[in-house]
Image (cartoon, rainbow, N blue to C red):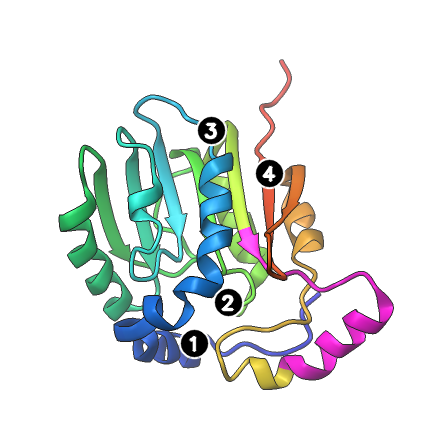
């Protein structure tokens, strides 16, 4: 589990600060993971997808055209940037954006056909609660895609990630969290874990298994 403490309010302030230049600064580094996740998103006509931590809307242009997208982010400034981008990229997509905490989603159970979360689990104060919420709002049989760094299971690399995590948290993320373990604890069935080319991030392809009758 996570060792480095994450301050939710500090993260909100930090990512609000990043909002004007987020795509310019982090786009090239994080775009491959987002694109890989979108390539793995099941294509269902008219599906309703929740993106947790949509930021400035970096993924909006990657969704299938007939997707109903609901995006949330803790930072009002990030949502403001995403709304500006949505006006240019809607192109048949229904897009609804809200300021909201990933650990307290204001949606009924089983509201979405799929849930996507990119680079969020290692920036929230309670990663397990965030994963529990994604599981809750996903429909039975729905897909859950999580793009994130996860602490290495190799002893030396894992130790290095533990050492540097208290420094990286000031940049907006931690490196000592085993995200895959947290995802499993939330009850999400892992269908596959895909490495992102030229990076340390992974795309976790999960699902909410339908209850057997």
- Residue 128 lies, with reference to residue 164, above or below; the image says above
- Say if 178 sits above or below 45 in the image: below
Decide whether residue 140 is among the magenta residues: no
Q: Is residue 123 above or below residue 165?
A: above
Label number found at residue 11: 1
Relative side of 89 to 60, left or right: left
Q: Are marks 1 and 3 in contact (CB under 8 Å)?
A: no
Q: Earlier in the sequence, mark 1 or mark 2?
A: 1
Say which label, 3 or 4, has the lower sequence index: 3
Q: Which residue is mark 4?
A: 206
The magenta stretch is 147-165
- Give the secondary structure at mark 3: loop
**First in sequence: mark 4 vs mark 1:** 1
- The answer to whether the residues at label 1 and label 2 have Cβ atoms under 8 Å apart is yes
* Tag 3 near tag 4, CB within 8 Å: no
Q: Locate the N terminus by quadrant.
A: bottom right
Residue 167 placed where, x, y %?
Answer: 60, 86
- State the CA–CA distance, disc 1 to disc 3: 31 Å
Q: Quadrant of the C terminus?
A: top right
The answer to whether any part of residue 72 appears in the image is: yes
- Say which residue label 3 marks: 42
Q: Which comes before the other along the chain, label 1 or label 3?
A: 1
Per the model, the C-alpha gap separating discs 4 and 1 is 26 Å
Secondary structure under the numbered disc 4 in the rendered image: strand
User: Where does label 2 land, which residue?
Assistant: 124
At x 51% / y 44%, what residue is drawn? 36
The image quarter containing residue 161 is bottom right
Q: Residue at x 53, y 70 (%)?
A: 125
Please give the name of the residue rendered at 59% of the width and 40% of the height, measured from the top-left corner: 205
């Amino acid at each position: 589990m996570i060792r480095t403490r994450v301050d939710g309010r500090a993260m909100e302030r930090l990512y609000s600060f990043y909002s004007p230049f987020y795509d310019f600064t982090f786009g090239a580094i994080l775009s491959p993971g987002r694109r890989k996740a979108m390539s793995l998103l099941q294509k269902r006509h008219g599906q309703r997808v929740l993106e947790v931590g949509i930021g400035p809307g970096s993924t909006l242009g990657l969704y299938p055209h007939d997707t109903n997208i609901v995006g949330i982010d803790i930072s009002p400034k990030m949502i403001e940037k995403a709304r500006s981008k949505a006006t240019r990229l809607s192109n048949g997509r229904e897009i609804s954006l809200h300021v909201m905490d990933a650990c307290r989603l204001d949606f009924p159970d089983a509201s979405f056909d799929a849930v996507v979360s990119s680079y969020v689990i290692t920036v929230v104060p309670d990663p397990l609660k965030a994963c529990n919420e994604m599981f809750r709002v996903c429909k039975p049989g729905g897909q859950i895609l999580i793009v994130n760094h996860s602490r290495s299971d190799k002893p030396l690399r894992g130790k290095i990630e533990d050492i540097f995590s208290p420094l990286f948290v000031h940049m907006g993320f931690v490196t000592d969290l085993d995200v895959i373990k947290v995802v499993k604890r939330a009850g999400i069935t892992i269908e596959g874990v895909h490495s992102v080319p030229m990076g340390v991030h992974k795309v976790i392809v999960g699902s909410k298994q339908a209850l057997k009758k």
